[in-house]
Amino acid sequence: MNLFLQGGKVATEDAAPHRADVWIVDGTIQSVAVMDAPAGARVIDCTDQVIMPGMFDAHVHFREPGQEHKETIYDGAESAINGGITGVVMMPNTAPSIDSPAMVQRVLELGKKCRIPVHTSACITVDRAGHEMAPIAGLKEAGILMLTDDGDAVPNAALLRRAMEYGREFGMFFASHCEDPQLCGPRALNEGPVSYRLGIQGTPALAEEICMDRDIRLAHATGARLHIQHVSSAIGMETIRWWRDERGAQVSGEVSPHHLMFADEDIGDYDTHYKMNPPLRTREDNAALLQGLKDGVFRIIATDHAPHTEFEKSQAFVEAPNGISGLDTALVSLHDRFIAKGEFGWDLLVKRYSAEPRRMMELEVAEVAEGKPADLLVFDPKKETTFTKDFMKSKSSNTPFLDKTLKGSVEMVVLGKEILLER
Amino acid sequence: MARKDFLDIVSLERSEIIQLLDQAEPFKDLFTRSVKKVPALKGKTVLMLFYEASTRTLSSFEVAAKRLSADVTIFDVPHSSVTKGESVRDTIDTLQAMRADYIVVRHRLSGQPAAIARQTNASVINAGDGAHAHPTQALLDAFTLREVYPEMEGRKVLIMGDVLHSRVARSTSTILTKLGVEVAFCGPGSLVPQTRFRRFTNYDEALRWGPDAVYLLRVQKERQEASFYPSDREYHAVFGITEERLKRLSDEGVYVMHPGPVNRGVELCDGVLDYERCLISQQVENGIAARMSVLYGLKPQLS
């Protein structure tokens, strides 16, 4: 392999993209500088394109084992590559749940057949049922990066506290899906004028706020490191800010592209593509979350990639499953909605969707820099992408972007010695 | 009116509502004749698909369809393949093959009739879905109120009770608003959400607002069980039409409406049913005329 990416701009996490050519030989970046094409190199014209490190998504549902009709680990990873993402962390709410060392080994084995690194988290409680602690030391030994009962909060505060106290010894990193199990109701959409109009019991933002406060307090008291997943509300975001800034709590936050872009009013006449959990809230929440991202309250962006089949999503709104397929569309949609409009720059994107998630997971950060292994993508901001079913590599296409055309295109993905994608 | 379906009130224009109301009048006149039928829907099939038990609404639709000379089939949901776990989508494919012209749907899930409407060429009429909409009830309510107040503009209607879970409250408040009636809600704080309507949680304050009619909602047993209010007894004392309150309504000439079936001793006392301005029986009778008007006005898209 001898590849020369010519004429592009290189994006980093702390500065605006700068003009540089990138020369890669056998999976290692030889140089990042303006130079003439080396003899024998395959030259790729990257004029007006952005070269950046591969993205990393710390929150994906790959459905295997148990729900392979929605997604498999392999297809999920291909969907990631299609979107410029070169590493993921799976959530443990498979069937059966990833709550034992044997299950961890099984999914990691499947992950090794993929073209990108596939990592996994595991449950805090056995079968995510909230009754007994999962074998934390064994899970760590088997290679998990994080503990979470994602999909639900741990309903029992005493059990979560004990798990945090116990898990500290093993340096465990906890992540919380924050929703008070009683207040949240049937979990179909946000409580407000839209839930009233549609006649469906809503989930109040209060359910998230209260649980978030509880979990951060527990982590702060026990000294556990805690990450709050998919924050959906303005006060939720402010809760993290307050605990971090005013009390020095070791807490990080995550925001998903859909919570930045969509609100409950987009549901319109029961469009299940906008049904996810935590639910889409209001335009005011969108704005507050975006501000939280700019202010660094959110350490990472993650999609909560949650594939479901067309049939499942065609059921009545209450019965259709929660979730949005996100990996194919994340980067292009973030470009279309925010970068192209000047809301934030490439540096924020690289920091929050590539560098920080890897740091958070204690993995090596991908960088487009001399001597580093190749882990990068080429993005064309001027080209457009139409998200047809054929285009998307996920097994499911449950996204509001289905058949929509957005500004930007992932043109090439390179990882190590392989060109994973070349459009 | 060239609509295929009748799913909610929100999407109707005021002119369409008035047309439906006007059209119901000659149908109502039929009821006092010896032959109560017209041949308007002769040769058409109306299929009743009630996923939720309802004798009253089902009978009302059945009578309405028969008075239009339609053939009526009642799809027996409790004894059907639905109990074997068949999805609604697959049931509708089956019914589509039977070429019904009209499907009247009641379902416990909000939005289900709309989903069915998208799937079939038959005209779909929403006979109540979850807490979302009950548009034919709204139409008959408006029709009934118009009989006592031909000029509806500026009249005031107080909707009392479990607004939070009520599809009737949603549809009836919407139709009345579109017809220029002022609507307010009243009930326990736990059952009356914040909406664009005036909201009372105190009965006396609500009456001081000066309603021309009080519309009582049925209070469902399970709400008490879920602790939305402490007991039926306390509900009746604080938010029910007691004998004492009935006297005040009578003094002020206020009409009483209710979608039925009533809970005596909860939202109302026995005396309300004998009250001279109680419109409950008219509502039932008008329900048939209103539903005839809806069936008559729709245009199925069958080839």
Image: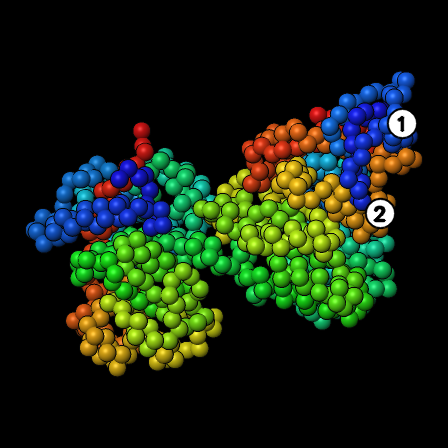
Q: Which residue is mark 1?
A: A25
Tell me the quarter of the picture where residue A414 sits: top right
Q: How far is mark 2 from mark 1, CA to CA? A: 23 Å
- In percent of width and height, residue B253 lies at 19, 72
Say whether residue A52 is left or right of residue A305. Answer: right
Quadrant for the C terminus of chain B in the image: top left
Asked whether the residues under marks 2 and 1 belong to the same chain, the reply is: yes
Residue at horizontal 71 percent and vertical 65 percent from the top: A242
Residue at horizontal 73 percent and vertical 36 percent from the top: A84
- In percent of width and height, residue A151 lies at 65, 55
Q: Nearer the viewer, residue B118 or A373?
A: A373
Residue at horizontal 22 percent and vertical 58 percent from the top: B152
Tell me the quarter of the picture where residue A329 sits: top right
The amino acid beneath tag 2 is: Leu
Q: In the rendered structure, which disc, 2 or 1, sits on the residue that comes first in sequence? A: 1
- Near mark 1 (Cα within 10 A), the count class, few <14, some 14-19 or many ≥20, is some
Q: Is residue B170 visible?
A: yes
Q: Nearer the viewer, residue A38 or A17?
A: A17
Chain under numbered label 1: A
